[in-house]
Image: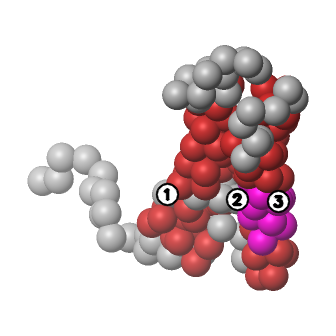
Amino acid sequence: MTDGPRRSTDSAPRRPLPARAERAGREGQAGRAGRAGRAGWAVRVMAAGVVVLLGVLSGYFLAVGYLAEPGRTDTRAHSAIGAGLGLFTGALAALVTWAFVATGRLRSWWLWPPVLLIGAALLRLTVWAPPPYGSPLP
């Protein structure tokens, strides 16, 4: 009276997933990116330190560009050199930050400070550039 071999779905018990695979499945990308132990923590601190150092360097160059004394003959040169170096180091910081964010070492909000520094450098080089020497100040 049976229609064929009978299959039981409960015959083979399921093996539980290892804790690491469970955590990775639950957290998605963050589970893969997070490293266990001190090595992962140290790499994230190093990545943040590199990004902060590049941001401070870019900020210093931008401060030189923005604080150039108006009315002197070399104001435009100091402003352009400071803003140009700030733009370069800001772009370098953005690339390094993007690499760390893409590998999961840093979160995506770390991309905002380099982008803002690049915007400030571009504004100083274009819209807020000092007037040429000898022209009346506004």
Q: How busy is the neighbourhood of tag 2: few (under 14 within 10 Å), some, or many (20 plus)?
A: many
Q: Helix or strand or loop: what does disc 2 sit on?
A: loop
- Residue pointed to by mark 3: 53
User: Observer-nearest residue: 74 or 96?
Assistant: 74
Direction bottom: furthest residue:
38
Q: Say which of marks 2 and 3 sits in front.
A: 3
Q: Disc 2 versus disc 3: distance between alpha carbons?
A: 16 Å
Q: Disc 1 versus disc 3: distance between alpha carbons?
A: 30 Å
In the image, taking residue 122 as reference, residue 90 lies left or right, namely right
In the image, taking residue 49 as reference, residue 2 lies left or right, namely left
Q: Helix or strand or loop: what does disc 3 sit on?
A: helix
Q: Which stretch did the figure color magenta?
A: 45-56
Q: Is residue 93 visible?
A: no
In the image, taking residue 6 as reference, residue 103 lies left or right, namely right
- Residue pointed to by mark 1: 28
Principal secondary structure, stretch drawn in magenta: helix
The answer to whether 64 is drawn above or below residue 82 in the figure is below
Name the N-terminal-most of marks 1 and 3. Answer: 1
- Residue pointed to by mark 2: 105
